[in-house]
Image: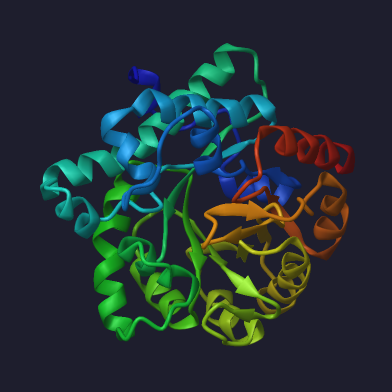
Amino acid sequence: MSGPSSQSPSPAAEPSFAEALAAGPVVLDGGLSNQLESAGHDLGDALWSARLLAEEPEAVVLAHLAYYEAGAQVAITASYQATFEGFARRGIATEEAAALMGRSVALAREAAARARAGGVAAPLYVAASAGPYGAMLADGSEYRGRYGLSVDELERFHRPRLEVLAAARPDVLALETVPDAEEAVALLRAVRGLGVPAYLSYSVAGDRTRAGQPLAEAFAPAAEADEVIAVGVNCCAPDDADRGVEIAARVTGKPVVVYPNSGEIWDATARAWRGSPAFSGDRAAAWVAAGARLIGGCCRVGPDTIAELAAALGALR
């Protein structure tokens, strides 16, 4: 599965993640789930890609490796849907669940080690994914928010797994696909004192969170959070990402993270994607001009598109 290289931090000669963002655009990976599915893995499970942490860890390594080899500098771990509660429903005890969360970081480190061995020279990083509370429920509420829980309750949910992910020493914690500004406040509290920087990324519709709050208000708490080194949007339409980047930069003054979906629409009735992709590397220049520094793709964005994006960003450096 993974050798000693997967347990060690990024080489000392490489700049820190924050330093890399300050130096210029950094390329994120694309959708982990679509890469796994394209390799023939069934993710029709409440644990989604997190199931493979236990059952097929090599598949996760190969998915990360495909993105590193395509030009991504950052791999987002397979821990988006990994929670103590979700694992418990599958009969996985707390200690084993914590080990699987830590493994998600180790597998991405292993992919980075293989990429370097294969000739990839760019600095490579690992972002430990922490999805929203609704991802654990696996009922679509991750795209609505408004769970009926208080900020304190959400903080108590998020803190234990963030502690475990931070202990695995990723380069950054990815607080991603957050649908609700109240949950964002809980996450900002939950990352305090962990010793690992974080980025906060909302899932949006237009210029509002999925829960309906104006983005200008939703981004404001992140401006004062020292642990947060980038703020932005993901898992949204490319056109909505355009607006999200501008608002995030203006409100927070921090580097912006952006990784939208392909632009296709999921038809839940037919259980199929509809429409045509609207994501391409051509958008990169406008995002960088607006303040984006961490740029990639989310659902339905694969290695070919990330390679195109990496080439476009390379031309801007």
Q: Is residue 142 visible to the viewer in this orientation of the structure?
A: yes
Image height of 90 relative to 222, above or below = above
Q: Residue at x 71, y 38 (%)?
A: 306
Q: Residue at x 41, y 83 (%)?
A: 146
Horizontal side, residue 39 vs residue 219: left or right: left
Display colour scheme: rainbow
Residue 61, by quadrant, is top left
Horizontal side, residue 95 vs residue 70: left or right: left
User: Residue 270: x, y in percent?
Assistant: 55, 57
User: Residue 62: x, y in percent?
Assistant: 49, 24
Asked whether 184 or 70 is in front, the reply is 70
User: Residue 239: x, y in percent?
Assistant: 78, 66
| Outermost residue, front side | 270
User: Residue 148: x, y in percent?
Assistant: 32, 86
Horizontal side, residue 88 vs residue 118: left or right: left
| Number of on-image labels | 0
Image height of 66 relative to 34, above or below = above
Image height of 80 relative to 100, above or below = below
Residue 55, by quadrant, is top left
Asked whether 270 or 240 is in front, the reply is 270
Q: Residue at x 24, y 60 (%)?
A: 160
Horizontal side, residue 91 vs residue 141: left or right: left
Image height of 307 relative to 76, above or below = above
Quadrant (top left/top right/bottom left/bottom right) for the C terminus: top right
Quadrant (top left/top right/bottom left/bottom right) for the N terminus: top left
Q: Is residue 11 visible to the viewer in this orientation of the structure?
A: no
